[in-house]
Amino acid sequence: MTFLTTLLIAVVAFEHLYFLVLEMFLWTKPKGIKAFGLKSKEFAEETRVLAANQGLYNGFLAAGLIFSIIQNDITFAIFFLICVTIAGIYGSYSTKKIKLFYIQAVPAIVALIVSLI
């Protein structure tokens, strides 16, 4: 993998580690509530377990991308970048928040394109 490819994959991985932290540990805190536009602290408390589960899955995506860097395995990286892209597209569609597409899917798409060139 080239330096640029590795850097872009790392950016996507660290982004998903950040999502993990937001969803698993900061969901009910002001930062988490603001980041996800939650309607209230009470709603955040009610959905805490779902968010933590979501955060765990983001952690798995990050782990896969980091593993692909460590192993220098572009095939593995492409698989996880496609997973991230699909998650970003679906998340944006299902929540009707286009911002999610730009935050999650676009960096993965850029990394995917660079890795395929």
Image (cartoon, rainbow, N blue to C red):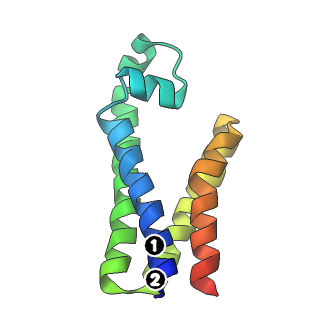
Q: Which residue is mark 1?
A: 7
Which quadrant holds residue 99? top right
- Relative vertical location of residue 13 with respect to residue 29 in this rendering, above or below: below
Residue 109, percent across and down? 63, 67
The amino acid type found where label 2 is placed reads Phe
Which quadrant holds residue 10? bottom left
Which residue is depicted at the point 64% across and 36% down? 95
- Relative vertical location of residue 13 with respect to residue 42 in this rendering, above or below: below
State if disc 1 and disc 2 touch (CB < 8 Å). Answer: yes
Indicate left or right for 33 with 28 as reference. right
Which residue is depicted at the point 57% across and 64% down? 108
The amino acid type found where label 1 is placed reads Leu
Residue 40, percent across and down? 47, 12
Which residue is depicted at the point 45% across and 23% down? 33
Q: Tell me the SS state at disc 1.
A: helix
Residue 67, percent across and down? 32, 74
Which residue is depicted at the point 52% across and 77% down? 78
Q: Is residue 55 in view from this perspective?
A: yes
Q: Residue furthest front?
A: 3
Distance from the alpha carbon under mark 2 to that under mark 1:
6 Å
Q: Tell me the SS state at disc 2.
A: helix
Instruction: Say which of 13 and 51 sits in front.
Output: 13
Indicate left or right for 33 with 85 as reference. left
Q: Which residue is mark 2?
A: 3
Q: Is residue 90 in view from this perspective?
A: no
